[in-house]
Image (spheres, grey):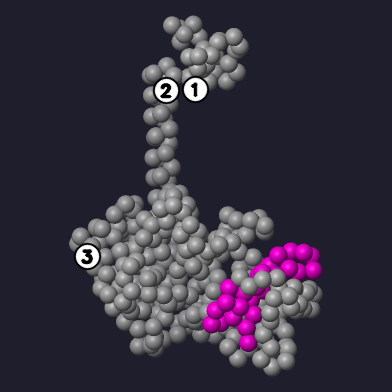
Amino acid sequence: MTTQLAVQQLERDRLPVVNDEIASEDNRYRLLQILGDGGYGTVFLSQNTQNRNVAVKTEKYSKSMLHIEVNGTCKPDYVYVVMTLLYKDLHKLRSELPDRKFSFSTALRLAIQTFSAIEELHSIGFISRDIKPGNFAPGHKATKQGKIIFMYDFGLARRYLDKNKNLVPSRNEVGWRGTTRYGSLVAHKRMDLSRRDDVESWFYMLIEITKGSLPWRLVTDRAQVYVAKQAAREGDGRKNFLSDTPPQYNSLLTWIDALVFEDTPPYSKFYNLLETVCSEQISRCRRIIEKLFQIREESKIRMYEHWDWEEDTSPITSISRTNSERN
């Protein structure tokens, strides 16, 4: 995710602007344009001394969350982190499609890669608390990492393990964390979040990228969104929620709802189920292809035959026609 950490100590309250140049011990970065600006800092499209495009995130030390995003040392008053340049996030990419829906092949591959990123974050002792499509993006084509999905923006991330690798106890009721559309049921109750809640948010994201929308997409009241999420677990509500998805998605939701605060999600179990979906889709495609070949043979259709209006004056390279086929 992150290629380099660097720290710049400038005059107090000095924030970077486009065309500024900042330096680390082994490189310099010119800030070309603003890619994003939020409460925790500004992200610039930048270029280093090797003319390589990278992303540079900057923020004031007093508000810095970079110590969460990268394991490094920060000094007052100004910090920045150099990151791999990413392409558009998954939310933007889906929104640009005509029907706002990924193909099933893309959705399933995104499911596996995003779940892998979440597991990796958990493996180093952090939870995201804000899993959503807008926090995942493929690598930029210019970096030849377009097939890799990256997780980024860890502004709400929190350690769930202490320095001795022990689980940090639940603080019970806390404030709201996350994004309403993808927040877990526990988040709606304003209770402390855990790995379970990251996985639940991932599942809502999975449904959205598979079907194109969530039942509560147009609901703005947070309490009503909570009601809709509860309804999606029972009877016809669950049936509608999981319609047009593989039957394995029902199992995923059941497993997620069985998890409690202290549990380690069964990552391998999830992967195995997703791989089963992949295998079934591959088998389905193979059966379709075999059926098409069967129809072609039964109809004596040869894809490389001449058209009716063409003169048969030259041999056909890939498939030769026999006399019986011409009759």
Q: Residues within 10 Å of mark 3 (few under 14, many from 20)?
A: few
Q: Is residue 65 left or right of residue 19?
A: left
Q: In this view, does 274 lie to the left or right of 44?
A: left
Image coordinates for residue 122, horizontal then vertical, percent: 50, 73
Residue highlighted by disc 1: 303
- Taking the spot 42% from the left edge, 66% from the top edge, the residue there is 202
- Give the label on residue 296, or none: 2
Which residues lie in the magenta part? 36-60
**Disc 1 + disc 2, Cβ < 8 Å:** yes
Q: In this view, does 256 lie above or below 21?
A: above
Which mark sits nearer the N-terminus, 1 or 2?
2
Give the amino acid at mark 1. Met
Image coordinates for residue 306, horizontal then vertical, percent: 52, 16
Which mark sits nearer the N-terminus, 1 or 3?
3
Q: Is residue 46 magenta?
A: yes
Q: Is residue 103 left or right of residue 46?
A: left
Which quadrant would the C terminus be assigned to in this image? top left
In the picture, residue 220 is in which quadrant? bottom left
Which quadrant would the N terminus be assigned to in this image? bottom right
Q: Is residue 70 visible?
A: no
Give the amino acid at mark 3. Glu
Q: What element carries label 1?
A: loop
Q: Distance between the residues labelled 2 and 3?
A: 46 Å
- Give the label on residue 323, or none: none
